[in-house]
Amino acid sequence: MFTVRSMSLRRRLLCRRLGHLPCSASSACQSTPPGSSSIFTASICDLFRFSLWKEMATLTGINAAVNANPNKSFEVHPPPSDSVSSLNFSPKGNYLVATSWDNQVRCWEILAGSSQPKASISHDQPVLCSTWKDDGTTLFSGGCDKLVKMWPLMSGGQPTQVAAHDAPIKEVAWIEQLNCLVTGSWDKTLRYWDTRQAQPVHTQQLPERCYALTVRYPLMVVGTADRNLIVFNLQNPQTEFKRILSPLKYQTRCLAAFPDQQGFLVGSIEGRVGVHHLDDAQQSKNFTFKCHREGNEIYSVNSLNFHPVHHTFATAGSDGAFNFWDKDSKQRLKAMSRCPLPIPCSTFNQDGSIFAYAVCYDWSKGAENHNPATAKTYIYLHTPQVVYLSKCSHSKLVVLLKPLLVVLITLLCV
């Protein structure tokens, strides 16, 4: 198990009206085990947020008197006017895209020591997800308006609709090897799209609403309400490869496929991460660990990101913290200072030299803790250090220090 300092989670006001909350909450309606503290699910929070958004206007909050940037990260300007739902770097350059609850999709070019706004488009309702095409020319975005827009961002073209569902679209991913788009929705379906056609190539029924999705060809894993995890082999995308119940006891919040496609990480609203291998012969390597907690207070794990080079990973949570881990050595490599507001999403750039994360209210503590007068959203860029990202750096350090420790102990005993 990982040794960890934790933090807190009081999941947002659950709401049954739409079945989705912005940064976490759809499964929130699941029952809580007897004797445990009340935990509100993340996806349900999204549901709650969506329903509240229809009645109010702007939703987000932060106390300006508190230091929102304790890690001294570089701040992206100008930030969205409402909470951020997803962050994505282009696979071909340092272009960062953020989707947010103010109905906007924004793109910045990240240059040395600066961020330049490049372009933005609007949806009719809050935007929940985005993904880049593999060549870095085009962006896809989806959300509460139940459709996906294709935006030829690099050529300056206008967005066009290329996909639609019967309920808000929570996840979208581009599959380069199939030259198609896959979308996951709260309408309990997964749909594959040829962007040149108006109708989906295939519609896959899901057991419940889609809350999370991860793709590393040929592996795709979909997380739904009721803790279902559906595994697909994209060489046969119309058939489920395996369906399992999450190793975590509470609602799934995020997923990340292993870089070698041999398994995946799953994060939940209970401040816990599961490391799961697909091969039956590797089941002894499966384990779960606690994170993003402090004492009896538990916070949702909102984001999981593997480093593209070292294959260590980052977690970000509603406690306002982000940490770096190595699943193979079961070590936490680095714990960063806690921000005053939740981190709803995060991502690495294509070479892992930049870690982007959003700091904003995620509704995990309900509407009563939202103050529109001091509402603010931040997007930060952190430069990770190789010393705490590389797997080998820690093992080498131990090898180097061991003889020195032996000498020290010997001298002390003389």
Image: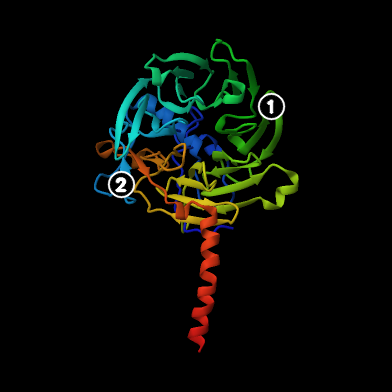
Looking at the rendered structure, the secondary structure element under dot 1 is: loop
- Amino acid bearing label 1: Gln
Give the position of the N terminus as an image quadrant.
bottom right
Q: Residue at x 67, y 52 (%)?
A: 285
Question: Which label belongs to residue 235?
Answer: 1
Question: Which label belongs to residue 68?
Answer: 2
Question: Which label belongs to residue 307?
Answer: none
Where on the picture, by quarter, is residue 82? Answer: top left
Report the front residue among 10 and 90: 90
Image position, residue 16 (x, y; %):
50, 31
- Amino acid bearing label 2: Ala
- Mark 1 vs mark 2, foreground winner is 1
Report the front residue among 394 and 22: 394
Q: Which residue reaches farthest bottom?
A: 414
Residue 35 appears anywhere in the view: no
Where on the picture, by quarter, is residue 107? Answer: top left
Report the front residue among 355 and 128: 355
Q: Residue at x 62, y 15 (%)?
A: 201
Where on the picture, by quarter, is residue 261? Answer: top right
Q: Is residue 220 above or below residue 392?
A: above
